[in-house]
Amino acid sequence: MKTLAILLLISMTAMAGTGVPVIFDTDMGNDIDDALALAMLHGLQSRGEVRLVAVTVTKDNPWAARYVSAVNTFYGRGGIPIGVVKNGVTKDEGGYARKAIDNGRHAWSEKTEDAVGLLRRVLEKEADGSVVVIQVGFSTNLAGLLESPGGRDLVARKVKFLSLMAGDFAGRGPEYNVKEDVKSCQKLVQVWPTARVWSGFEVGRTIKYPARSIERDFGWAPKHPVADGYRAYMKFPYDRETWDLTAVLHALRPEAGYFDLSTAGTVAVDDQGFTKFTETPGGRDRYLKVNDVQRARVLEAMIWLASQPSR
């Protein structure tokens, strides 16, 4: 029995250093899908598929970073560095971050650093062409990285590809993550040098995370910051769109067939925040598409990963 425990500890220690290095850039606190997406990343890390090397926050309120810290700490990964935006476009505390953790139920750290500086430091440490960047909020931090000295070259050298929850490729109108900081998103599409996959508003809108999963699948932890946040965000029970979760799932399991991809092309962003895709041979942009069969598989995977018990 003792030998088995030692082998398990060795296995878990080895697993902690494996997996695709991931940077998660989020406007945590504006919508609850960010919290579920972060839970998915921890589920994937517990499976050895990813290594969350940094979380950067584009919501300019201290409770956003505190909530991220509380989630990371809950999963036993409180040492993951957290970067915060400068002069962000949303400054309110949001609908759930403070409510979920400012009650003595969860521990968090106040330790943060400048987001752009953290992005540079983390990228420098990783192998060339290895890092997957997932942006599920505004483009403020990534635009700042590109504008920093040598930032574009650093991205080109270190990043494998960028997964974004942004835009609307069904023509409904400007999407929130784009229109709230249009200038930064325009900078991103003009300068970001690697392949980019966009999960538009129309994808996550059609796949809703069920309240029954919060009630049933998170019961292994009586004090769970993600379940607490979900209950605090809106009058419970409710099912919520999975916008940010789609960007995470495709980014880290791109060959699993959860989604289809558009042809290669170019995304342009106008001054009102409309996104327009133009098919272009050799273009670095693609966007996700999903059918009814895939939706069922996607939701099942999201539920399993977001609710996976921490080790």
Image: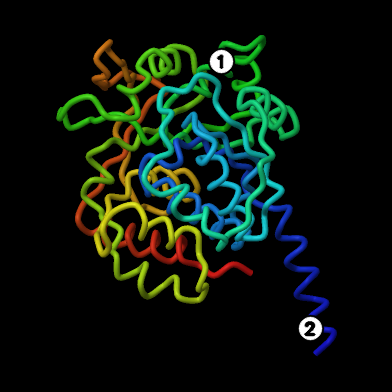
Counting from the top left corner in percent of width and height, residue 268 is at 31, 16
Q: Secondary structure at mark 2?
A: helix
Q: Amino acid at mark 2?
A: Leu
Task: Give the numbered dot on residue 254.
Answer: none
Task: Give the numbered dot on residue 146.
Answer: 1
Counting from the top left corner in percent of width and height, residue 51 is at 64, 49
Residue 255 can be seen, yes or no: no
Counting from the top left corner in percent of width and height, residue 2 is at 84, 86
Residue 180 can be seen, yes or no: yes
Q: Is residue 109 above or below residue 302?
A: above
Residue drawn at x 71%, y 57% as measured from the top left: 16
Counting from the top left corner in percent of width and height, residue 271 is at 27, 10
Residue situated furthest front in the rendering: 103
Quadrant location of the N terminus in the rendered image: bottom right
Is 269 on the left or on the right of 306, as rendered?
left
Q: Amino acid at mark 1?
A: Leu
Quadrant of the rendered structure where residue 296 is?
bottom left
Nearer-the-camera pick, 229 or 190: 229
Quadrant of the rendered structure where residue 234 is?
bottom left
Can you identify the residue that label 2 sits on? 4
